[in-house]
Image (cartoon, rainbow, N blue to C red):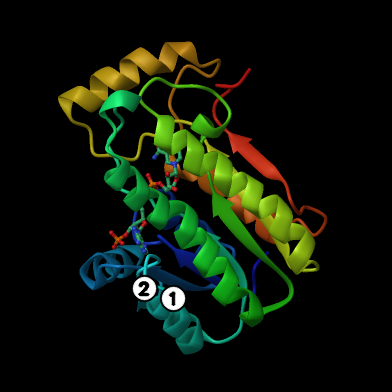
């Protein structure tokens, strides 16, 4: 399905990005995984067991992003799964500095990567952003996260028009059980699961399937694929 295609995954060293990497390799792609930590990238590359190119990039640093694409050269598909560190917290207790730093990584990080990467994307290529279900539903404690996810989807729609025929889409994950289980996390999963029609949280693999679909779906652009176990029903 992705034979002779080069796929670049920023955030490919863990979670959903790692699951996309596994599926893209299985589909025959040549894969570049990128994130800030060289150590995390090396660990991921060892675990994958199939050769991948690893590249250090910090999406909050314009020069780092520019140099990253210069090193990689031309490619087919770019997917971005950067997760900012911003703990959920009620609006009145959310510091604007922490919220802005998270916005800088998630929203502006995707903006910078798309802007600098676009010129290297081959014919029939694509960009896939990541938002999150908080863009579509209100969840207490998710004010800044909701805003950056909604902004991501809005950006993708406009640049899908400007960059065509390069396709630009967004995957919107619901709640995903990617963290190692801790007592708190287990309780959270138990509470949330019964609220979903499918009665479970998603796996990283469940979400990764949507990126693979968007890489090859030649008539999909400017769209949002929601993978949430029915959370927005
Ligand atoms: N997990 C969920 O429940 C869930 C739900 C809805 C939406 N999402 C969204 O799905 C995406 C992936 O989530 P995940 O749970 O798979 O995250 P994750 O496991 O924490 O992975 C995030 C990846 O982003 C990289 N990264 C973070 N900051 C970066 C930066 N400034 N520049 C380059 N790379 C950076 C990390 O590696 P380094 O630390 O090495 O940089 C890591 O590879 C995120 O956008 C998240 O908001 C997740």
Question: Can you tell me whether the CB of the residue at mark 1 lies under 8 Å from the nearest atom of ligand 1?
Answer: no
Q: Position of residue 231 (x, y in %)?
A: 55, 21
* Left or right placement of residue 178 versus residue 180 in this view: right
Residue 54 % position (x, y): 37, 76
- Identify the mark at residue 213; answer none if there is no mark: none
Can you identify the residue that label 1 sits on? 65
Q: Position of residue 153 (x, y in %)?
A: 62, 45
Q: Identify the element where label 2 is drawn.
A: loop
Foreground residue among 165 and 89: 89
Between 19 and 59, which is closer to the camera in this rendering? 59
Q: Where is 15 relative to 28, above or below?
A: above
Q: Is mark 2 within 8 Å of ligand 1?
A: yes
In the picture of the structure, the residue carrying the numbered disc 2 is 57
Sequence order check, earlier mark of 1 and 2: 2
Query: Could you say which is closer to the camera, residue 232 or residue 160?
Result: 160
Distance (Cα) linking label 1 and label 2 = 6 Å
110 in relation to 225, above or below:
below
């Amino acid at each position: 399905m992705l034979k002779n295609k080069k796929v670049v995954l920023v955030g490919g060293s863990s979670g959903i990005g790692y699951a996309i990497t596994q599926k893209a390799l299985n589909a025959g792609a040549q894969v570049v995984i990128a994130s800030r930590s060289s150590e995390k990238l090396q660990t991921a590359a060892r675990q994958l067991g199939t050769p991948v190119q690893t590249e250090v990039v910090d999406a909050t640093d314009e020069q780092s992003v520019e140099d990253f694409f210069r090193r990689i050269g031309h490619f087919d598909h770019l997917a971005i799964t950067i997760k900012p560190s911003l703990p959920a917290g009620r609006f009145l207790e959310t510091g604007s500095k922490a919220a802005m730093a998270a916005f800088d990584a998630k929203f502006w990080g995707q903006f910078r990567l798309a802007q600098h990467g676009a010129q290297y994307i081959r014919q029939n290529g694509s960009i896939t952003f990541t938002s999150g279900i908080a863009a579509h539903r209100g969840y207490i404690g998710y004010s800044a996260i909701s805003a950056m996810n909604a902004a991501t989807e809005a950006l993708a729609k406009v640049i899908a028009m400007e960059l065509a025929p390069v396709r630009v889409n967004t995957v919107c994950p619901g709640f995903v059980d990617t963290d190692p289980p801790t007592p708190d996390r287990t309780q959270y999963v138990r509470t949330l699961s019964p609220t979903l029609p499918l009665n479970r949280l998603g796996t990283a693999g469940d979400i990764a399937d949507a990126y693979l679909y968007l890489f090859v779906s030649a008539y999909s652009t400017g769209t949002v694929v929601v993978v949430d176990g029915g959370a927005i029903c």
